[in-house]
Image (tube, helix red, strand yellow):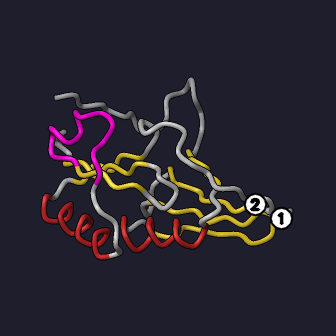
Amino acid sequence: MDKTVIPTPWPGRMPASRFRVMRPTANYEAVLAFYEQGVGLDRLGEFVDHDGYDGTMLGLPAETYHLEIIRTPDADANPCPNKDNGLVFYIDDPDALAEVVARIRAMGYSPVSARNPWWGNHGAVTFEDPDGWPVILSPSNS
């Protein structure tokens, strides 16, 4: 079992105070619904028409990392370049993991096989968001 330990605070060689993953989409509302209503991330902030860009930051409360979904004036479909690109959420409680899976299924999404079979072999459930990006819900012991 591989356990990665992330030091707190950030190491001195990288004095960042926050970490954000930014991703454009042409399916703005659907992607926001998937991550908010399905995955269960909180809406941490948003902006409208900053030089033609709209954006919403989603994440876990009180954490210094989050996902920013953006819509641009010339938003094109943003297909996943490779099915190994994705997000992994480690969920400690098996009942909570089952609840998130049920919520996403209730939205009409079905689990898919992860490109890397390790995830499925270790109890993770993979969905694709509206743009086709993998979202892996993994037990914390994986």
Judged left or right of residue 125, residue 77 is: right
Around disc 2, counting alpha carbons within 10 Å, would you say few (fewer than 14), some (14 to 19), or many (20 or more)? some
Around disc 1, counting alpha carbons within 10 Å, would you say few (fewer than 14), some (14 to 19), or many (20 or more)? few
Find residue 77 and name its label.
none
**x%, y% of residue 103?**
28, 72
Quadrant of residue 3 within the rendered picture: top left
Quadrant of residue 97 within the rendered picture: bottom left
Circles 2 and 1: CB atoms closer than 8 Å: yes
Front in this rendered view, residue 5 or 136: 136
| Vertical position of residue 104 compared to residue 86: above or below | below
Chain part drawn in magenta: 112-124
Three-letter amino acid code at the position of disc 2: Thr
| Vertical position of residue 7 compared to residue 71: above or below | above
Q: Which residue is mark 1?
A: 52
Judged left or right of residue 124, residue 45 is: right
Q: Main secondary structure of the magenta part?
A: loop
Label 2, label 1: how far apart the Cα atoms are: 6 Å
**x%, y% of residue 115?**
33, 37
Q: Residue at x 77, y 63 (%)?
A: 53
Q: Which residue is mark 2?
A: 72
Classify mark 2: helix, strand or loop: loop
| Vertical position of residue 66 compared to residue 29: above or below | above
Three-letter amino acid code at the position of disc 1: Gly
Q: Residue at x 44, y 65 (%)?
A: 35
| Vertical position of residue 129 compared to residue 1: above or below | below
Q: Earlier in the sequence, mark 2 or mark 1?
A: 1
Judged left or right of residue 99, residue 108 is: right
Looking at the rendering, in which quadrant would you find the N terminus? top left
Front in this rendered view, residue 79 or 59: 79
